[in-house]
Image (spheres, rainbow, N blue to C red):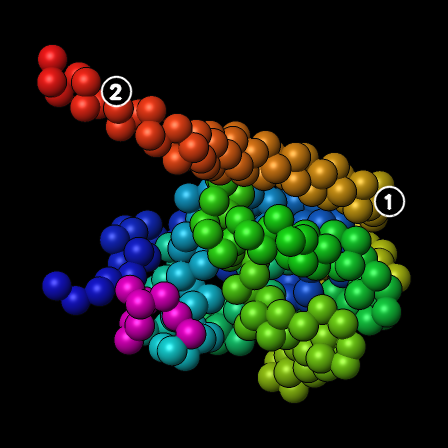
């Protein structure tokens, strides 16, 4: 039987039109603009949406594999399968009328082509500030030796998320987390979008974030409350610390201790082999 994509068994359809594509990279004010869009009446998709609904993880991971990676770099069961397009994104994002953060930023070209009527917002910040933020959050997690072990051997409930994010950055920057490769990838992401989107459809937003340019671009009245400024660095660090503890405990309880017990039993059996053999022979003789 021929391989099939997971998304092909999904029968969801789009429920509301896609209106806004926020395609700046993660850690560029994407949490704040998600909150801002919510206050303006949109229902934005964000990486937190994936974390809250983990059934999305295998679909987004599949999307990255079949859309960006050559067959030789894909899992065997995904080789030869077609990339995601409008029909697939309608299934994944059918309940949302806006997107921001990863995974969507990775699929910037596919989403722009799929939703030609949606306006595009490009959140931005200075590369050096972005790199500093990434190295104390997502990139730090991806480079932990424990995380690499978990990802390689597909251990713990965290493994699917870690494997997905690792693939995202394989696509984005080849899993290079320092200049010049990481900086070139970051700048290429923004230059590609600027060159691809007509100027009248694009808003460059940041590093100073206020309601006025966003509301003017989206044709909304400016709210009376201040523009949301969510600094989720502390919360992300708490999540990373909790995740590290959970992965450590899983490996200790499910891998290290059982392995030590088996090794200890094997060593004891070897050292006592003569006594064990004598006992076996006496038992057989009755």
Disc 2 packing (10 Å; few <14; some 14–19; many ≥20): few
165 left or right of 127 in image:
left
Q: Earlier in the sequence, mark 1 or mark 2?
A: 1
- Label 2: which residue? 279
274 left or right of 178 in image:
left
Q: How many marks?
A: 2
188 left or right of 92 in image:
right
**Residue 156, horizontal then vertical, whole percent:** 49, 40
**Residue 63, horizontal then vertical, whole percent:** 42, 64
Tag 2, which secondary structure? helix
Whether tag 1 and tag 2 are in contact, CB under 8 A, the answer is no
Which mark is nearer the camera, 1 or 2?
2
**Quarter location, residue 14:** bottom left
Number of the label disc, if any, that sits on residue 84: none
Question: 219 above or below 73?
Answer: above
Tag 1, which secondary structure? loop
- Whether residue 12 is visible here, answered yes or no, is yes
- Label 1: which residue? 226
Q: Among all residues in the image, which is located at the extreme top?
A: 286
Start-end of magenta stretch: 73-81
Disc 1 packing (10 Å; few <14; some 14–19; many ≥20): few
**Residue occupying image coordinates x 63% and y 74%:** 173
- Whether residue 40 is visible here, answered yes or no, is no
Question: 38 above or below 66?
Answer: above
Q: Nearer the viewer, residue 80 or 273?
A: 273
**Residue occupying image coordinates x 64% and y 63%:** 22
Q: Report if residue 78 lies within the magenta region.
A: yes
**Residue occupying image coordinates x 69% and y 66%:** 24
């Amino acid at each position: 039987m021929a391989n099939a994509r997971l998304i092909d068994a999904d029968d969801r359809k789009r429920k509301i039109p896609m209106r806004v594509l926020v395609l700046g990279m993660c850690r560029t004010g994407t949490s704040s603009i998600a909150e801002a869009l919510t206050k303006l009446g949109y229902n934005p998709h964000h990486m937190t949406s994936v974390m809250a609904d983990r059934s999305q993880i295998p679909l987004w991971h599949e999307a990255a594999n079949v859309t960006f990676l050559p067959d030789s770099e894909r899992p065997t069961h995904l080789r030869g399968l077609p990339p995601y397009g409008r029909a697939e994104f309608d299934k994944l994002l059918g309940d949302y009328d806006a997107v921001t953060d990863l995974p969507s930023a990775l699929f910037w070209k596919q989403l722009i082509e799929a939703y030609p009527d949606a306006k595009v917002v490009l959140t931005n910040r200075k590369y050096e500030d972005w790199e500093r933020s990434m190295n104390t959050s997502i990139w730090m997690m991806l480079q932990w030796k424990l995380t690499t072990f978990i990802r390689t051997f597909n251990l713990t409930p965290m493994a699917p998320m870690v494997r997905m994010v690792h693939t995202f950055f394989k696509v984005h920057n080849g899993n290079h987390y320092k200049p010049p490769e990481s900086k070139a990838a970051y700048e290429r992401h923004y230059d590609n979008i600027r060159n691809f989107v007509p100027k009248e459809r694009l808003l460059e937003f940041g590093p100073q974030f206020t309601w006025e340019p966003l509301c003017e671009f989206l044709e909304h009245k400016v709210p009376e409350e201040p523009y949301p400024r969510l600094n989720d660095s502390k919360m992300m660090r708490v999540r990373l610390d909790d995740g590290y503890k959970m992965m450590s405990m899983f490996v200790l309880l499910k891998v290290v201790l059982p392995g030590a017990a088996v090794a200890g039993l094997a060593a004891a059996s070897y050292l006592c082999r003569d006594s064990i053999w004598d006992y076996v022979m006496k038992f057989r003789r009755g």
